[in-house]
């Protein structure tokens, strides 16, 4: 079955499930210090920025997490902490405002490079600049994973993902528990076991795997699952997606890469979906 024929019924399923058009929700709130995205200032001199996470009346969703001091970072109880400073400020006589950001690249919504878990790939230069942008952009299927376990081979079989689907965003119990909104890292998050990762690699056409916490791999199979996914250098892992309040179905995924640096094992990105 061709990709086109496979994707058409999925697209129709999505069109039968319209999204909410609410501008501000619990998952996509107005950013503190700004006004609601559905409200315009009545005072032209009142300079309060409007920052959107939903665009086009609910047709475009930003599914990357906004960086804040209290967001979780890998295996830490303390969260990210202060990561942004203003070493050059116009208030202090500088010609322009220039910010400085310091944080681990394994923070917030990000992709993994093959060099993340393979040192010979790292030494050979397989960094995030070598990832295929075509894989990072295009039709993607958002699926709800059964909430009772990690993503095992049996769970993968039960999802019945059709051949030809190349990008899948897996929404799990992590979203229900709002783990990305809690400061302390939680090792009980849901992720892929080794056999689940192997089943995906061996039995599907999926080349982009997205998940809703800081690792696609379950804590118990942390390295083994990564090794299965990244050994062939064909699958791109997108971690810590924000998938709250979005209906399952087919979307168009758009990825904007952040600042790139050779030999980096991760890269922070902005991800959005539209339908």
Image (cartoon, helix red, strand yellow):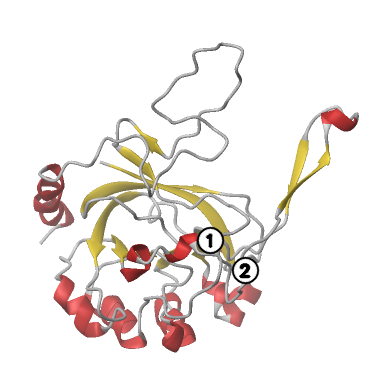
Mark 2 vs mark 1: which is more N-terminal?
2
Q: Position of residue 103 (x, y in %)?
A: 68, 60
Q: In which quadrant is the C terminus drawn?
A: top left
For disc 2, the marked residue is 125
- Which residue is the extreme one toward the right? 93
Quadrant for the N terminus, please: bottom left
Q: Secondary structure at mark 1?
A: helix
Residue 60 versus residue 221 in the image, above or below: above
Residue 27, horizontal then vertical, whole percent? 38, 49
Q: How would you rate the neighbour count of disc 1 (Cα within 10 Å): few for under 14, some for 14-19, many for 20 or more?
A: few
Q: Which mark is residue 130?
A: 1
**Whether label 2 touches label 1, CB < 8 Å:** yes
In the rendered image, residue 109, in percent from the top left (x then y), is placed at 49, 58
Whether 150 is drawn above or below 212: the answer is below
Residue at 65 percent across and 66 percent down: it is: 263
When asked about the image quadrant of residue 104, the answer is bottom right
Residue at (44% x, 57% y) in the render: 132
Q: Nearer the viewer, residue 185 or 158?
A: 185
Residue at point 59% right, 59% down?
70
Q: Which mark is residue 212?
A: none
Residue 170 image position (x, y, % from top left): 30, 65
Q: Up-down: is 68 above or below 169? A: above
Q: Is residue 51 above or below residue 67?
A: above
Residue 115 vs residue 185, the one in the foreground: 185
Could you classify mark 2 by the number of other residues whose Cα lies within 10 Å: few (under 14), some (14-19), or many (20 or more)? some
Choose top left, top right, bottom left or bottom right for residue 24: top left
């Amino acid at each position: 079955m061709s990709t086109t024929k496979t994707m058409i019924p999925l697209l129709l399923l999505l069109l039968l499930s319209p999204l909410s058009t609410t501008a501000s929700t619990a998952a996509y709130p107005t950013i503190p210090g700004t006004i609601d995205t559905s409200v315009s200032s009545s005072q032209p001199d009142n300079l309060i920025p409007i920052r959107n996470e939903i665009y086009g009346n609910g047709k475009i969703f930003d599914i990357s997490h906004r960086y804040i001091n209290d967001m979780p970072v890998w295996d830490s109880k303390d969260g990210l902490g202060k990561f942004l400073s203003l070493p050059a400020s116009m208030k202090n006589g500088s010609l322009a405002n220039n910010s400085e950001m310091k944080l681990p690249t394994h923070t917030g919504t990000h992709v993994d490079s093959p060099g993340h878990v393979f040192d010979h790939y790292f030494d050979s230069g397989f960094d995030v600049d070598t990832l295929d942008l075509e894989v990072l952009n295009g039709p993607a299927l958002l699926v709800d994973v059964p909430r009772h376990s990690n993503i095992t081979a049996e769970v993968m079989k039960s999802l019945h993902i059709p051949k030809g689907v190349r990008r899948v965003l897996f929404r799990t119990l992590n979203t229900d528990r709002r783990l990305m909104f809690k400061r302390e890292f939680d090792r009980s998050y849901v992720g892929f076991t080794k056999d689940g990762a192997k089943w995906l690699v061996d039995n599907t056409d999926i080349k982009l795997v997205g998940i809703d916490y800081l690792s696609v791999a379950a804590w118990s199979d942390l390295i083994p699952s990564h090794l299965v996914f990244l050994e062939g250098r064909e699958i791109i892992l997108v971690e810590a997606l924000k998938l709250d309040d979005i209906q399952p179905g087919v979307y168009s995924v758009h990825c904007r890469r952040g600042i790139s640096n050779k030999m980096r094992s991760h890269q922070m990105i902005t991800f959005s979906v539209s339908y």
